[in-house]
């Protein structure tokens, strides 16, 4: 059994430390047949890209990405293109030009952390420009909290019902995104 993939995020570290930690992860994972996703640039939380003066420096640089992918031989690259973890403050500002360049230059699957709340059209466009994996934690948790809260308003709620509501919430959000991304029926 075990894992089929791992993600190493040393994106807040220096280039050298990120490179070294990613190389160590690949060296451990590859012999076990485990794929490795790494992050270059840094995906901020909330409105980080929109309020920090150094935000542009946190985005994934396409030229550095080429070098990073070549040196590490990772299987997937999580990119920072204006996407954020958690809730977006205002309208998401995705740098599609940067994404197109990353896709053209790296030739590996790109990953979008912070897909919750990015918007249907933005998400479809990111897929068009090379995103092959999305992360949805915030929307799943928000939906689950709302539905569990409503369920618990009835003081006689059975704990098993809460568990079912949680599972249904996950299925609902994932089903919506699977339809949106066009992956339904694809293996």
Image (spheres, helix red, strand yellow):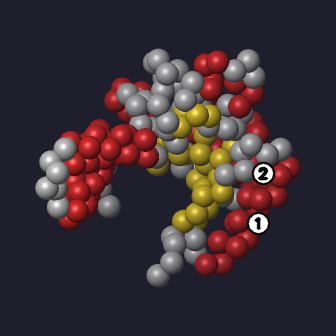
Q: Position of residue 145 (x, y in %)?
A: 32, 44
Q: Is residue 48 left or right of residue 118?
A: right
Among the 4 quarters of the image, the one containing residue 44: top right
Q: Residue at x 73, y 71 (%)?
A: 27
10 Å neighbourhood of mark 1: few (<14), some, or many (≥20)?
few
Q: Is residue 5 left or right of residue 31?
A: left
> Which one is in front, 21 or 66?
21
Q: Which residue is mark 1?
A: 24
Q: Position of residue 179 (x, y in %)?
A: 25, 43
10 Å neighbourhood of mark 2: few (<14), some, or many (≥20)?
many
Sequence-wise, which precedes: disc 1 or disc 2?
2
Q: Is residue 82 above or below residue 164?
A: above
Looking at the image, the residue that sits furthest to the front is 155
> Which one is in front, 110 or 20?
20
Mark sitting on residue 126: none
Q: Residue at x 47, y 17 (%)?
A: 90
Q: Is residue 160 visible?
A: yes
Among the 4 quarters of the image, the one containing residue 58: top right
Q: Residue at x 49, y 22 (%)?
A: 89
Tell me, yes or no, whether the two marked residues, 1 and 2, touch with CB atoms within 8 Å.
no
Q: Position of residue 42 (x, y in %)?
A: 67, 38
Among the 4 quarters of the image, the one containing residue 8: bottom right
> Which one is in front, 167 or 150?
150
Which element type, helix, strand or loop, lies under badge 1?
helix
Q: Position of residue 64 (x, y in %)?
A: 76, 39
Q: Which residue is mark 2?
A: 18
């Amino acid at each position: 059994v075990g894992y089929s993939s791992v993600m190493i995020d040393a994106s807040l570290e220096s280039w050298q430390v990120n490179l070294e930690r990613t190389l160590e992860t690949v060296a451990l994972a590859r012999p076990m047949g485990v794929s490795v996703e790494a992050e270059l640039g840094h995906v901020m939380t909330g409105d980080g890209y929109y309020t920090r003066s150094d935000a542009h420096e946190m985005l994934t640089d396409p030229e550095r990405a080429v070098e990073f992918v070549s040196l590490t031989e990772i299987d997937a690259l999580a990119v920072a293109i204006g996407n954020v973890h958690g809730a977006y403050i205002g309208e998401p500002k995705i740098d599609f030009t940067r994404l197109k360049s990353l896709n053209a230059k790296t030739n590996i699957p790109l990953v979008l952390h912070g897909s919750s709340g990015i918007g249907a059209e933005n998400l479809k466009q990111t897929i068009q420009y090379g995103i092959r994996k999305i992360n949805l934690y915030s929307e799943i948790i928000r939906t689950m909290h709302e539905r569990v809260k409503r369920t618990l308003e009835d003081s006689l709620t059975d704990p098993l019902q809460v568990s079912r509501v949680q599972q249904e919430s996950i299925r609902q959000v994932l089903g919506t995104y699977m339809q949106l991304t066009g992956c339904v029926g694809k293996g």
